[in-house]
Image (tube, rainbow, N blue to C red):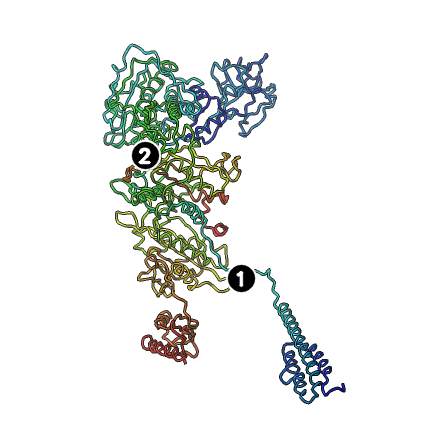
Amino acid sequence: MRVSLKWLAEYVDIDLPPEEIGHRLTMAGLEMERIERIGAGWDEELITVGSVVSVEPHPNADRLRLATVDYGADEPLTVVCAAPNVEAGQKIAFARAGATLIDARSGESAVLKPAKIRGVESSGMVCSEQELGLSEEHEGILVLADDAPVGTPLAQYLGDSVLDLDVTPNRPDWLSMVGVAREVAALTGTTVREPEHTYEELDEPAPAKVWVDIADPDLCFRYVASLIEGVELGPSPAWMQERLTAAGMRPINNVVDITNYVMLELGQPLHAFDFSNVGGGKIVVRRAKKGEELVTLDGEKRKLTTDMLVIADEKDAIALAGVMGGAGSEITDKTQTILLESATFYGHNVRRTAAQLKSRSEASTRFEKGLSPELAMVAAQRATKLLVELAGGRALHGLVDSYPEPVKEKHLDVTRKRLEQVLGIDLPTSAVRGALTSLGFGCKWEPPEHYQVRVPYWRTDVDIPDDIAEEVARIIGYDKIPTKSLGGDVPPAAPQPLRDLRERLRDALVAAGMQEIITYSLTTLDELSRVLPEDQISALLKVVNPLSAEHEYLRPVLRGSVLKTLAANVRHTDGETALFEASRVYLPREDELPIEQEHVVGVVAGRREDRWGRASDEPVDFFDAKGYIEAALRAAGVVGTFSAAEEHGLLPGRTATVQAGNETVGVVGQVHPDVAASFGLDQDVYLFELVVDYLLPAVEEGVDYKPLLRFPPVVQDIALLVDLTQTAEEVAALIRQHELVRRVQLFDVYEGEGVPADKKSLAFSVTYQSDEKTLTDKEVAKAQASILTRLHAELNAELRG
Amino acid sequence: MAAGIVDLDAIASTARSELDAASDEAELEAWRVTHLGRKGTLTSVLRQLGGLEIEERRRVGSEANVLKGELEAAFEAKRDDLKGQKLAATMLEGQIDVTLPARKKRVGRLHPITQTTREIVDIFVSMGFSVAEGPEVETDYYNFEALLLDRDHPARDMQDTLYIDYERDGQYPFMMRTHTSPNQVRFMEEHKPPIRVVVPGKCYRNEATDPTHEWMITQIEVLAVDEGISLADLKGTLFEFAKRMFGQDRRVRFRCDYFPYVEPGVDMAIDCFICGGDGCRTCHQEGWIEIMGAGMVHPEILSNMGYDAERVTGFAAGMGAERIALLRHGIEDIRRFYQNDLRFLEQF
């Protein structure tokens, strides 16, 4: 909402600087975004109101003329003027040499210099709006109101400050000058002057000529119509045009300007029909019929649906209620009688219709927020008065008012205790009453506890006592509310084991050397189809109104986004790149919200670093990725079991699932080269994925301490010949089962010379230790023998000679 | 020396010159064996004393013992000396250039939004709040209706919504949540007052992006509900947060603002920590930076939860981690966070 302070001053006295007004409004909830200063650069001495005394042709140029201007000095000045619309008798903005204006050609500020134009001396200028910085308009000069006082500095006459205010959706009354004036009055301790709305009427009663029927009262709460005869279409007065322009609207003609002016002044949108085109003199407010069409003011033929509300005459729709008028009933210069509509439509319906037809306007945004039906009558009277006084009209007697269910004035019983309970301060009754009455509320104090509050009709947002608490607080100022620390018992903490585990995994991976990334939750179908099997692609969730195709699909895996991020970053480094993300994924369900799972996905690629931190010749491999996932598992206090597996998108033979407890909690492997290549990665990439939700059950709560062993360990190395396909983990697990074995560590894997072709050698370092005594050589030998027997029997393993 | 068969002076002089000449531990040990050992020169002198007159025996014995003491002391001194020399030699040999680069230990970093979110959450935890999380895909009920935003509420425009492509009764009932406020309702449904909870999480807006707007954001929701909670508690708690987060000398500004699910509604700003409130680019010349929306929980919501809204009151607040991180680190473009350029991420 653009608020001209000059215009505002018509309704309220303003003694404070514009910044202070803006600040107070901001603190009270009506945020000022900026102040626009009109005429801030106009020199008071050199740019003044002038009067064109005479206009003569230029002796040497057809397109130029000589204007003699009285600007309040003893002698008038004659200047060269190129504008086609300059005429004797006009009041204009006159600048003399030395004034700073906007150069029409360059658009930049320039000092006006005396010049000889086609042989005629000219040391002044009749200004256009563009030269004054008011608009882009440069076709002709700016013509001022006839009563503009000659010689007055233009900055005084036309200068203004326009506050750009951000109106919250609960306050349609702030979308009006009077509404803002009420607020300013309350915040500066003064009162509002409401606009006049009485006028002379003809004897003939309007209700005799026009019928109004609200057929759908659920969508139209009140319809007020007045009839004005003999209106002469023409430009509206200069002051009105100035105000409309300051508010950001384009002046059109007196009738349209008056409806817009009253909308800006009071917040009630209005519409003027050519009464001769209202068939049967009948206004029917009804839902559109099936298949009904309407050519709207913009010339478009609109197909209407049955949930749209129209204004119709006895036969056809002639306007879309609250959204746009129809071309057939538009005001023209042939219009004799105007039917002025001031109605209250159901905001939700206007909003929906305007959205469907993509024609939201100043009018529809006001209706959307829900206007008071009381306002319709006030605005109808005000606009009729202006049509009578400024457009030569004659108003018929009375207004036609269809108001099926008049709204009752709202009264609230507000207790002093409730105000203190909400605000944390027991305010004096004078402060409460002062704040409320300054805003137009009625407030009666009934000691010892009750305020009886009457809500003014324009405050559609106030319904409950706590709304009154806010009104009082914002007028006295939130800074007057005391500051307290929360007291009372600290509530018990709700445990969040899944979140805690996820955060632990994050910390562990960072400590292990990985960089955390966070990528967008929505992605492309293309990206997902590179990492998912086909049957999952068809079931994906997507948003119906994506911002762009880049962010359309809800991801059920993080892999794609993480690989994409890796690809975007590997070109910056030769060494190892290790990234992970811990985020939610979304798994579709029938007719229910998707399941959201916490996933942790890491990728590693590149070459290990040498002693100097440079990339070595050694590429990272599967076991780097395995190392990271093990670091994460260790932080969770979980021992994972890895077994060879196949997984879509990963390379068979270099992929393992990770088990913890009885669950598969994740996977680790080399990204299939085709998949990597689809992301532009031409190197080996290793990836791991953990489902935190599945890992959680395997995490043990708390740690039970095991006493440190007092007796010395004995370490023995054994080398075993096993089948080529034998996994090391299975061998180690068997060894680990012996009661005296504390630790089994693989330290060599060998195939080749000295080992049969179908065998490989695995060397383990085995630590034996007892919690009861120091082990003898004999006892260790016995344990080893028993282990070897089992290894041979169960895994066909033999001690290597 | 005529007096005896033993020339202690000669022994002493030989021993001393040989000790001087010893240049390492092995030579020193050999010298000890030669002169002080069981079969050494001095010991043999003492062994021969038996053949002397008693008086002579006493004199020579005593002199020999004195000499033995002196030689032992000299031996100790020489040994320390050699040890010192050896250490010095070792040190010289093992001298390193300590300015050489370290053997790099890989260090990862948390994403800056994770860091900022944790910092915010931790401050509230230290004030007795617990942490909860909720779903990112929400129902219309939790995201809007339960927060008093009916389907046609004009304030729905404040939060452009990404709806899930799933229709029921001509409506789209599921959406990417536009804020963390649904968790006020979700938490209150499950818990009775007193409540103090903070809920971090990702939120989504169908909004064009620019240097100050991102469509995916991380919000932190704060909720306290109990008997006796007022606007004064809201101010006190959020002021304390602002001081811990942005510095003890921060000033705060509370002003009226509108959110449908609170009454009264509040906007909290802190004085600009770049210019100290004088006005600069960061604060758009205003001196104040708005960092969160807040307010007293609307009594209708409390009633809908089955609470006695006449007795129980509460406050709620919500803030964005990206905006706070942006301000604190002086980042010029909010979109950097989720572009994940490592050259950016590694700075935090």
Find out whether the residues at labels 2 and 1 contact each other: C-beta distance under 8 Å: no
In x, y percent, where is residue B156? Answer: 34, 36
In this picture, residue B203 sits left or right of residue A290: right
Q: Could you tell me how far apart the alpha carbons at marks 2 and 1 are, in whole angstroms?
A: 62 Å
Which mark sits nearer the N-terminus, 2 or 1? 1
Quadrant position of the C terminus of chain A in the picture: bottom left
Mark 2 belongs to chain: B
- A683 or A725, nearer to the observer: A725
Can the viewer see residue A263 in this picture? Answer: no
The vertical placement of B43 against B269, above or below, is below
- What kind of residue is marked 1? Arg
Q: Which of labels 2 and 1 is toward the front?
A: 1
Can the viewer see residue B191 in this picture? Answer: yes
- B74 or A533, nearer to the observer: B74
Residue B16 is labelled as: none
Q: Hey, which quadrant is residue B128 in on the image?
A: top left
Q: Residues within 10 Å of mark 2 (few under 14, many from 20)?
A: many
User: For numbered disc 1, what is the local secondary structure?
Assistant: loop
Pick out the residue farthest to the top.
A203
- In this figure, which residue is indicated by the disc labeled 2? B153
The vertical placement of A333 against A551, above or below, is above
In x, y percent, where is residue A441? Answer: 35, 23
- A97 or B74, nearer to the observer: B74
> Residues at marks 2 and 1, common chain?
yes
- In this figure, which residue is indicated by the disc labeled 1? B103
Quadrant position of the N terminus of chain A in the picture: top left
The residue positioned 34% from the left and 26% from the top of the image is: A459
User: For numbered disc 2, what is the local secondary structure?
Assistant: loop
In this picture, residue A82 sits left or right of residue B187: right
- What kind of residue is marked 2? His
Mark 1 belongs to chain: B
In x, y percent, where is residue B262? Answer: 35, 36
